[in-house]
Amino acid sequence: MSISQLIVIATLLWMLTSFVREKRGPDITAGIGVAILLATGIISPSQTLGVFSNPAPVTIACMFVLSAALERTGCVAWLAECIGKLCGQGLRSTLFGLIVVVIGLSAFINNTPVVAIFTPVAMALARSRNISPAKLLIPLSYASIMGGTTTLIGTSTNILVDGVMRDMGLAPLHIFSISAYGIIAALAGVIFLILLGPRLLPARATLSQSLQSATDRVFMSEVQVPSRSAVIGQTLTDAGLNGGSGIQVFKIYRNDEELSQPSGATHLEAGDRLLMHSSVRHMLDLRADGRLNFVREQDAIIEAKNTSASLHEVIVGRHSRYTDRPMSELNLTARYGIQVQAVHRKDENIQADLEQLQLHFGDVLLVEGTSEQIRRFADNGDLIILNSIEEKTYRKKKAPLAILAILLVMSLAAAGVMPIEGLALIAAASMLMTGCLTEEEAYKAIEWRILLMIFGMLAVSKGIDNTGLAELLVNQLATLTAHAGPVVVLSMVYLLTSILTEVLSNNAVAVLIAPIAIALAQQLGFNPYPFAIAVMFAASASFATPIGYQTNTFVYSAGGYRFSDFLRIGLPMNLLMWVIATLLIPILWPLT
């Protein structure tokens, strides 16, 4: 093995570790990987710049714009309103109506905004039917994933694998080439979720059900000891702040001193700032007795003067401008008159100063303010209010234009009039020309980090080819599988891709595995198309963890789930899709 191959392997191992640890964005990780390969001469600047001519990321960007046009013209919201009329009052009938609509919608537009819009809808359906939202939110995410695999434009992974196939000299897929398999797999998934979902899914209380149910969730809050407080001189135990009353102080800031993990015998002084874990109910009780003051940004004291203020919960959206910045810099109280009382991230408590806490996609905030203040806060920062379905202003008169655009893209692409990247580019431009979207909305709709990560991984794949590492891997795999039949090899390719996509970015997995799977099939004398199709579907079939797919991440906090909840229902779902792929792909795409 050459030095250059070792460098590429080391770079890939570092990138995979970075993807899993999530300390930096996948786009930054991919960019650093490209820089390493450039610096070592493994890839040339011309090869690096050449990936920007790849049509797949351009198509993906245009589909993001078309998805946003359907959203901003009210098409998605109209379907959301129809769900309540389509669904019955029982859990299974509600699941069926929700899943079918979301699958149909996700076949043509980006699934992340679909899940963001339908999450409050699902919670409202749960409230009206007296069922736990946790019974609906994981199926909502799964439905969007399955829907995205029913057409070529349904998800970025499909478009990306199609681009890899073109680069390797294979004929491109048509927009409905994968629809037969995708629909059958989705139908199997629907049956599984309807029959077994109610048993496998937990009935967890979430903040959005009601303030009463929210009082059981543990949050982190920050309070300050006022100058005339009755707790001055008392120990944490005497003041009831050492866990006995449902409130646990885990850090005290006193002047410039930080007291980590204070004991029950620690005495309190005026001006102490306390970081504590408590439920909403205990938080409200503590605030009512007046002994401590809740701290807002810039060390100001919260005064509950506005009697119309109430507690709301909001979830951080993918494009929120509040992410990756300390909350102290956001100045939310001065801007909107609101108070961020607590933060809940996934199923873990956050042990950090609220002022220095950086918000992430999927975080749930418990915010106090009037309905108007909360709505303004959410609208300006791409947040979704979970307590209620938001009433937004849509360009409904433009809706026929957005629908016509997506229909023309599908029909003309199916007829072979023009490659899909050209049609998508024309359609995206027409959305701006006709006023379905503003320039700002179009730029905001594009997942720039995903595109940069894709470009980076395409450049890294060049390094794998240049060093002969891809050929080496294919030869080794061909030797190992020489006596295995094509069905076995196909099944193993699907399984490997499915496992990797549970912990890594689905697009990164597709870029890395698709060319190897295609080359392996060619080396063994098999038809490469079914192997590419297996990678395409397996890279999207992330059901067993909340980190493998961004829609899973979104509902993770919103539904109050635990990591094990995804394993309980997601592992059987993954196994089902694996069996279906092993049996059905060879029928639809002959292996030899």
Image (cartoon, rainbow, N blue to C red):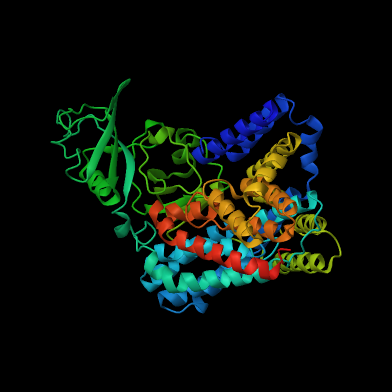
Q: Extreme front residue here?
A: 483
Residue 297: image x %, image y %?
41, 35
Q: Is residue 458 above or below residue 138?
A: above
Using the rendered image of the protein, determine whether residue 110 is visible from the camera's viewpoint: no
Q: Residue at x 35, y 49 (%)?
A: 306
For image coordinates 58% across by 64% down, the residue present is: 146
Q: Residue at horizontal 84%, vertical 65%? A: 416
Nearest the camera: 254 or 13?
Answer: 13
Write down the quadrant of residue 433 in the picture. bottom right
Query: Is 336 drawn above or below residue 268 in the view shown?
Result: below
Q: Name, please, the residue furthest toward the top.
A: 256
User: Horizontally, is 311 left or right of 157 in the view?
Assistant: left
| Quadrant housing the C terminus | bottom right
- Residue appearing at x 66%, y 45% in the figure: 512
Q: Is residue 466 visible?
A: yes
Where residue 409 sits: x, y (%)? 78, 64
Residue nearer the viewer, 212 or 49: 49
Q: Nearer the viewer, residue 394 or 326?
A: 326
